[in-house]
Image (cartoon, rainbow, N blue to C red):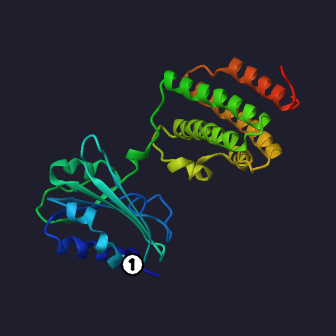
């Protein structure tokens, strides 16, 4: 198995061989002292360049790093013209996310608190502080933001119920993903509120298990559904119960108001829809 140092050596050799590349920084999960490491962790590396267009339009250099499974290329910020990113998954498990930014947008390479300088040909940077997770801390929501998320949860939950009743599986499952997103958001707030808003629960809550009390974590598997309508109904009500518990706790911690009446009315509405025969013309 290829080691992290071998991958970094390859990247640095690549940077040293191209005079357009002036600065290389390493960031993301592999720099994070609190993140678990395994063979699938991305290598997030940023190259600050005089010019890099030749690298975007001719990908013949990528196979030098290994056998390619798939490549994706995107602009980092089209409005600001701040750079481009080429992401490559290799067959050996290595994933390179290589950002390229122009010298006049140097700050783009430094906007992640999880950053380590690998190469600075021109001494452009002063010593950086040790990498930490500040860039990934959840932001304390305003009452308005809290209200938007709680409203979206209960509003879209009604869509899911109607989609099930109409036998629109794809629609119901798609809407249910929106419901899950709101639950993930309030769960991040729940965790952060208990740790002074200085904690990283991970992208999409991937580290919830690390931070949630067992009583709450044990409920999380129940919010995910199969393609079976009966299981989606079960998951839907489980998500409502968990959201209510976490949402009320967050509101209490922040001195906000949880929309209990919305919760109760939508829950009653969903129960009615569940019991409605397919041929019904009124609720």
- Answer with left or right where residue 250 lies relative to residue 160: left
Q: Splitting the image into 4 quarters, where does residue 7 fall?
A: bottom left
- Answer with left or right where residue 245 lies relative to residue 71: right
Which of the pair 112/176 is nearer the observer? Answer: 176
- Answer with left or right where residue 133 lies relative to residue 18: right
Give me the residue at 24% from left, 76% from top: 13
Above or below: residue 63 compared with residue 197: below
Mark count:
1
Residue furthest out toward the left: 122
| Image location (x, y in percent) of residue 271 | 82, 28
Which of the pair 58/235 is nearer the observer? Answer: 58
Give me the residue at 47% from left, 38% from top: 197
| Image location (x, y in percent) of residue 119 | 21, 66
> How packed is label 1: few (under 14 Cα within 10 Å), some, or many (20 or more)?
some
Above or below: residue 152 compared with residue 203: above
| Image location (x, y in percent) of residue 58 | 27, 68
Q: Which residue is mark 1?
A: 66
| Image location (x, y in percent) of residue 122 | 10, 62
Give me the residue at 63% from left, 46% from top: 212
Q: Splitting the image into 4 quarters, where does residue 173 fall?
A: top right
Residue furthest out toward the bottom: 1
Above or below: residue 86 compared with residue 237: below
Above or below: residue 166 compared with residue 31: above
Residue 202 visible here: no
Give me the residue at 30% from left, 76% from top: 10
Q: Quadrant of the C terminus?
A: top right
Residue 31 visible here: yes
Q: Secondary structure at mark 1?
A: loop
């Amino acid at each position: 198995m290829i080691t992290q140092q071998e991958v970094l050596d390859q990247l640095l050799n690549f940077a040293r061989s191209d005079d357009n590349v002036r600065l290389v920084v390493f960031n993301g999960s592999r720099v994070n002292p609190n993140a678990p490491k395994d063979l699938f962790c991305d290598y997030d590396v940023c190259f600050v360049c005089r010019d890099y267009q030749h690298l975007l339009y001719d990908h013949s250099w990528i196979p030098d790093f290994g056998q390619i499974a798939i490549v994706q290329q995107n602009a980092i910020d089209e409005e600001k013209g701040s750079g481009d990113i080429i992401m490559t998954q290799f067959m050996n498990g290595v994933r390179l996310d290589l950002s390229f930014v122009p010298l006049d947008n140097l700050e783009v390479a430094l906007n992640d608190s999880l950053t380590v300088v690998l190469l600075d040909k021109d001494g452009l940077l002063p010593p950086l502080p040790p990498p930490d997770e500040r860039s990934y801390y959840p932001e304390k929501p305003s009452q308005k933001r809290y209200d938007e998320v709680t409203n979206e949860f209960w509003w879209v939950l009604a869509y899911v119920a109607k989609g099930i009743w109409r036998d629109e599986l794809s629609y119901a499952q798609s809407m249910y993903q929106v419901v899950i997103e709101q639950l993930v958001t309030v769960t991040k707030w729940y965790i952060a509120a208990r740790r002074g808003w200085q904690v990283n629960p991970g992208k999409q809550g991937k580290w919830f298990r690390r931070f949630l009390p067992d009583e709450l974590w044990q409920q999380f598997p129940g919010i995910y559904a199969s393609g079976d309508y009966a299981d989606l109904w079960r998951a839907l009500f489980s998500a409502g119960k968990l959201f209510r518990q976490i949402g009320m706790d967050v509101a209490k911690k922040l001195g906000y108001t949880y929309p209990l009446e919305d919760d109760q009315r939508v829950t009653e509405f969903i129960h009615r829809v569940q019991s409605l025969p397919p041929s019904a013309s009124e609720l």
